[in-house]
Image (cartoon, helix red, strand yellow):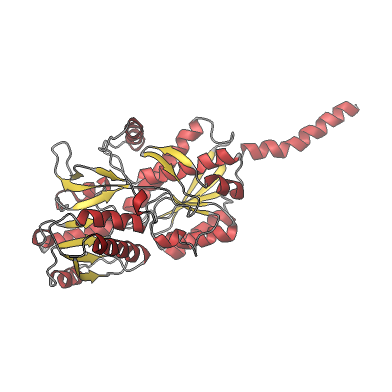
Amino acid sequence: MLHVLTMLLAALLALPLVAEAQKPIKVGMPMPLSGPPALFGDPATKGAQMFVDEINAKGGVLGRKLELLVRDSKADANEAVRVARELILKENVDFLVGTLTSAEGPAVSVVAKENKIVFIAPIPKTDQLTAADKLHPYVFRVAATTTMEGRSAAEIVARWPVTRVATISFDYAYGQDVTRAFVEHLKKIKPTVEIVDQEWPKLGEQDYNPFINAQMAKKPEAIFSSIWGGFFVTYSKQAKAVGVFDAIRYNFIGVGEAATPETTKSMGADYPVGIWGNSYDAFYWGETPAHRDYTARLSKYLKDEYPSSWAIQGYIGMQFLTEAIKKAGSTDSDKVSKALLGLTVDTPVGALTIREKDHQANRGQLYGKTVKDAKYPFAIMKPVTYVDPSKFMD
């Protein structure tokens, strides 16, 4: 009888451990799912969900399934903070992976710090997110930074036969930081350049004509823009209508992923073919077997012959999180945080590493001039080149 009671007690004590092992690992994802920013936010969540579905089909992580809880942040810092807190306090998520804008990312980083929960930012680029005075043990980034992006664009523009350059960017962290990085690096490598005008519309502006008119009055030979997403669609349609691209002979570079398949597909014949742009991914890149395999799986998952470029950022964010959980052998944020330091992951775009000193991944982007190709009913970058950001990271 004593032996039976002992066995029964042991079984009862083990029940909480079994229950804990069977509970899903919850990951909260604040991401814009409405308005113009949804052009990027929606596919990013789908990329994350595809990764979750794939890893769950293989048994999950540490014997537990992943569960992704997505909330619409509306590309608003206050709303991103509200839903992040709700995900932590009400939904009891174990981690956060998400946000899109450079207003949301730093705001949610503060929430992560307060709650001591790992937060991986797959998209926000502002240098301020991982700056020395903002860095803490729980924030990590697998996106490019404004310094990396601005300097990469400057290297391209420096080769153009122009000296009079203008800029147009939203007046908030991302726009300010990436424009500053572009201007400073361009002046350094091509001192003959003159910045003849800088326009700063508010984030979410819909009428760009006053800014366009003011800029063209300064007669620039080239324009740098960091207007992004559905906002770029609106801006470029208005600019094209008044002949901006023709006037500068298409010496225009749109960072903020102005050459993504999402953007070129959504604009069709309205896209200003001939400008330069960048993108995190392109289904037509096909550089490696790993990327071709990822693209085929994504195409099937999304039921889209020409799948999204933004899905890869959600996918990579979840890749890093799960590899860190495996390395830590735990879902404890302090242990996972330590596991992320110096972690290298084989992603669809190659091996990426999160640096210990600033929690920043060496994530580069694709750049190229947009052209029409008979294979596709929308513009693509050709040739498309992956720019290694390593020399621009410090």
Position of 256 compared to 102: left or right?
left
Residue at 47 percent of width and 55 percent of height: 358
The percent position of residue 182, horizontal first and vertical second, equals 28, 61
Give the residue at the far right of this rendering: 2
The percent position of residue 87, horizontal first and vertical second, equals 54, 54
Answer above or below: position of 232 versus 10.
Answer: below
Image label count:
0
The percent position of residue 220, horizontal first and vertical second, equals 14, 66
Res 38 seen here: yes
Q: Nearer the viewer, residue 15 or 378?
A: 378
The percent position of residue 312, horizontal first and vertical second, equals 37, 43
Q: Nearer the viewer, residue 208 or 164?
A: 164
Answer above or below: position of 98 versus 3.
Answer: below
Locate the N terminus by quadrant. Answer: top right
Answer above or below: position of 309 versus 181.
Answer: above
Locate the C terminus by quadrant. Answer: bottom left
Q: Nearer the viewer, residue 166 or 303?
A: 166
Residue at 80 percent of width and 33 percent of height: 10
Instruction: Examine the image and state in which quarter residue 301 appears.
Output: top left
Position of 326 compared to 54: left or right?
right
Res 94 seen here: no
Position of 109 compared to 13: left or right?
left
Instruction: Examine the image and state in which quarter residue 244 appears.
Output: bottom left
Residue at 26 percent of width and 62 percent of height: 188
Residue at 44 percent of width and 44 percent of height: 353
